Amino acid sequence: MIDRSHSLPVARQARELGISRGSVYYLPRPVPETDLAIMRRIDELHLEVPFAGSRMLRDLLRQDGIEIGRCHVATLMKRMAIEALDRRPNTSKPAPGHKIYPYLLRKLPIVRPNQVWATDISYIPMAKGFVYLVAIVDWFSRKVLAHRVSITMEADFCVEALEEALARYGKPEIFNTDQGSQFTSLAFTSVLLREKIAISMDGRGAWRDNVVVERLWRSVKYEEVYLHAYGTVSEARASIRRYLGFYNARRPHSSLGAKTPDQAYFDNLPVAMAA
């Protein structure tokens, strides 16, 4: 269906066909094996010390015997879509034409399912290459309502996950994101505005503003991703889908009093909605 020799860009062809650009396979420029190994280690270090920027990561990598320059680290961080997580003045700049919404969760008691949903994107290493994972999470119960794995960072796969969550679980009162271009895009915010959902955006690099999703990434990485070397994108999709099914239905959470996210979500819904 997709004709790469056509004058129309692949993204436009995908849109006309009604499919996600992220689902269109292409042959990317190979990433050197050495860079893939370094990116895997950067991903691990980022989970351990999320405040580390390119300078500190360079020094930590050198402690591991990896000789690398700061600019190279910064380039890999950009490719992985990660940055040091802290509060810095004058850094919350939207992409051109993208509106930034205020953060609505400060000091807000979150006491029920579907009060607040949140989302984020994470880098997922594979044996050769990498993909990106987006998840829609109910803040109260930690339940993953929908997710998508994509080979690109375009907004389409985020919109697909959002539409699935809305179709399956209704809608939240507030939806919280970071200021990534995928979430500030008109394609994404227009869905929230259409559903009359209040939009909240955390400060750029402020991990505490979206801590529930950050904790999800830690579980996904240490309990699933780092234990496997996915050989293909389809293998990554299937394995992550299985893990998130386990995460929702069987994995007890200490923060939920040893309940699973499914139990915390469905046990606290109004009777009519639960039915």
Image: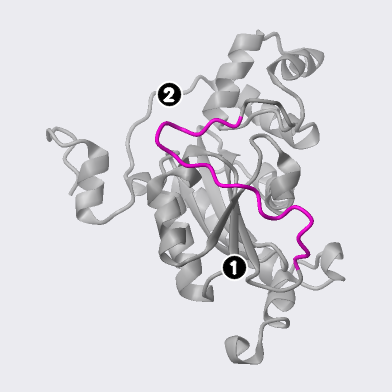
| Magenta-highlighted residues | 92-110
Q: Amino acid at mark 1?
A: Glu
Q: CA distance from mark 2 to mark 1?
A: 43 Å
Tell me if residue 149 comes above or below residue 268 in the rendering: above
Q: Residues within 10 Å of mark 2 (few under 14, many from 20)?
A: few
Q: Which residue is mark 1?
A: 173
Percent of width and height locating residue 196: 47, 66
Q: Which mark is residue 30?
A: 2
What residue is rendered at 57% in x and 22% in y?
A: 76
Tell me if residue 153 comes above or below residue 88 in the rendering: below
Percent of width and height locating residue 43: 67, 32
Secondary element under disc 2, as helix, strand or loop, is: loop
Earlier-in-chain disc, 2 versus 1: 2
Is residue 232 visible in the rendered image? The answer is no
Left/right placement of residue 184 relative to residue 89 reads: left
Q: Nearer the viewer, residue 208 or 195?
A: 195
Percent of width and height locating residue 103: 65, 49
Secondary structure mostly seen in magenta is loop
What residue is rendered at 79% in x and 31% in y?
A: 49
Asked whether 98 falls inside the magenta stretch, the response is yes
Q: Amino acid at mark 2?
A: Pro
Q: Which mark is residue 63?
A: none
Q: Quadrant of residue 107?
A: bottom right
| Dot 2 and dot 1 residues touching (CB under 8 Å) | no
Tell me if residue 59 comes above or below residue 137 in the rendering: above
